[in-house]
Amino acid sequence: MVTKSTRKPVPRRLSEAERKQRAEQRAYTRRIKVVFTNAGFVHLPTGGLERQFGQKMGELDQVFVYENVILVCEDTIEKNPRTHLKNKKILFDEIDSAKPELVDWLLTSFGDRLADFAQYDASRYKIFYLYFSKTDIVLSEADVGLFEPTRVVRPPTLAYLQKMSQNLRRSARTDIFRFLGLTSSDIGSADSGSANKRISTAIIYPNDNTGLRNGVRVVSFMMSADMLLRNSYVLRKDNWEESIELYQRLIERERIQSIRRYLATRQSTFINNIIVSLPPNVEFKNAKGKAVELSEIADFGTHQMFLPDEMNSICVIDGQHRIYAHYEGVDNLEAEIAKLRRKFHLLVTGLIFPPDMSSLEQRKIESELFLDINSNARPIPPDVLLFIETLKDPFSDLGVARQVLAKLNSQPPFQNKFQLSVMDEGKIKIASIIKFALRYLVEIKDDPAKLTLFAHWATADDRAQLIKDKAEKKNTDRLEMYIQFVVAVLTQYFNAVKAKYPQEWQDSDSRLLSTTPMNGFIIALRRSLPSHGVLAFEEYQGRLKNLKTNFSKASFPFTSSQYAKYSKEILANVFDIRDEPK
């Protein structure tokens, strides 16, 4: 008689590559978990629990909950994740069509983990579907709409949120909520919307005493560190927003920890001003309790000020480290800091902007003030200075160059290749490209020698009008047209370079997409303009056939500052120019 063996099959041994891949995936998943748990979200270990969601079976890698905010998270380290993303979008669609079922399952399966939070009606829960890919997925605007309700979290965004949660712990929640587009009234119970906070003594500066003639009013007051921490936000240029209106530096961990220790040890607040922009719906009353218009206040009399107690409503211009040193943490200083958050009040100077002033004009004023305050302090990084120059004068050579690079970075052949943020590691650094090459190519000036692209743009009347716009610094519509022209020319030119060197363009070990070659090509293009003007893609492609440059790290013959020297080689071999103009 033959009996069947009951011995379990021996699991297949994983290869070394498979073990490394699994370890990499676990590390990436842990990284996401730490971001949200540092910020006070509760982690629900849903990974490996396959169940039916609507018409589709599936599992959720991780879920995080804070009060009534639910984050359904999927993560992958795949090199080509778009197919995986499409499959998860289908799953998220099924979940989104039956949200109460998801809420019931989480409360039933993980109720013990959620005991610290109140339970809400299913309709009150705010559910977000976040997709984290270690390989950056470049999505067009159409793609973003196509994949809704899935929101792709790009690697630089995850890096930013990671840094904030490491440095600010629980207080990083407000940054996460701002990323998600949530307001104070969205969090918690439906009746917990923001209320006005009354500040009894606020001193409003008369216009004559500030010298401001642009309608901006200045007010000084005291505010608790707790309210500032809860309601402030900072326009850090390395966050998830793709906007030229961002200019602030990232939080520095050592600096914020040093201030935190100072607070706990010295038990005293700071007497130097925090500088902020106040929300437009701030209100004032006089000593008799009567509402007054800001425009009617012309003396130093004290007034009551009413501010909305609203998350992410106060924009910090200067003093972010002093504010965020009071963060809600889990370190051995937290017990002391928790008491000081409500006890200590900081001296605040707030700007109130006219209701008809554009956000770009507001950012310009804020960034100039930031620069005035910090120019004599710790040196400001070159890329921050470039952001501020763009805000101060978008018509300047630096400002135009910065805007051109931002647009080039959003489309081929440079899509997502420039380091517009310090979180974009391993990409083309832009400061030297703008400073030493691109600014001279794009400068708006009347140039008889035709050494800038401006001399080759549109008609003489258009150019004269744009020069007038530049002098008046008002209308940017014509500037936008010129920038689009520059982007189109550079796209044609560098598409030809890419066609000439397709492998080097994609090879991370190639020197092609580094500062020296990039500047060499831009300088050569500028110096070719008087002889050749602006050419089409096919003409550039034909001329580039004669260029023989080895871009390998070992063989590229030009050092990091030899831009002009390499441009001479391009001019000679591509444009047949050997006597460069002065």
Image: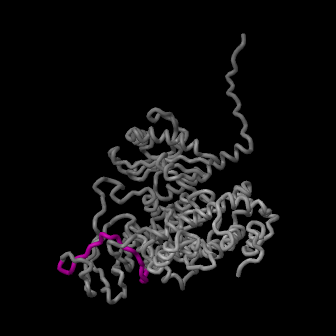
Q: Nearer the viewer, residue 101 or 118?
A: 101
Residue 228 shown in magenta: no
Question: Which residue reaches farthest right?
Answer: 555
Residue at position x 50%, y 34% in the image: 57
Q: Is residue 107 above or below residue 218?
A: above
From the viewer's perspective, tell me whether residue 201 is left or right of residue 116: left
Residue 392 shows in the view: no
Q: Looking at the figure, which quarter contains the N terminus?
A: top right
Give the percent coordinates (x, y) of residue 490.
Answer: 62, 64
479 or 542: which is nearer to us?
542
Left/right of residue 313 with respect to residue 133 in the rendered view: left
Q: Main secondary structure of the magenta part?
A: loop
Residue depicted at 33% across the width and 45% down the height: 123
Along the viewing direction, whichever of 217 and 556 lies nearer the viewer: 556
Q: Looking at the image, which residue is at 56% across and 69% down?
A: 457
Based on the displayed image, in which of its 4 quarters is residue 402 positioned? Answer: bottom right
Task: Identify which residue is drawn at 57% across, 76% down.
Answer: 443
Residue located farthest toward the bottom when viewing the structure as drawn? 209
Tell me: 220 left or right of 415: left
x, y percent for residue 520 = 71, 70
Q: Is residue 53 above or below residue 298?
A: above
In the image, the segment drawn in magenta is 270-288
Verify whether residue 280 appears in magenta.
yes
Q: Could you say where residue 473 lies in the image, as x and y percent from the top left?
A: 45, 77
Q: Position of residue 14 (x, y in %)?
A: 72, 39
Q: Give the camera-side residue of 516 and 62.
A: 516
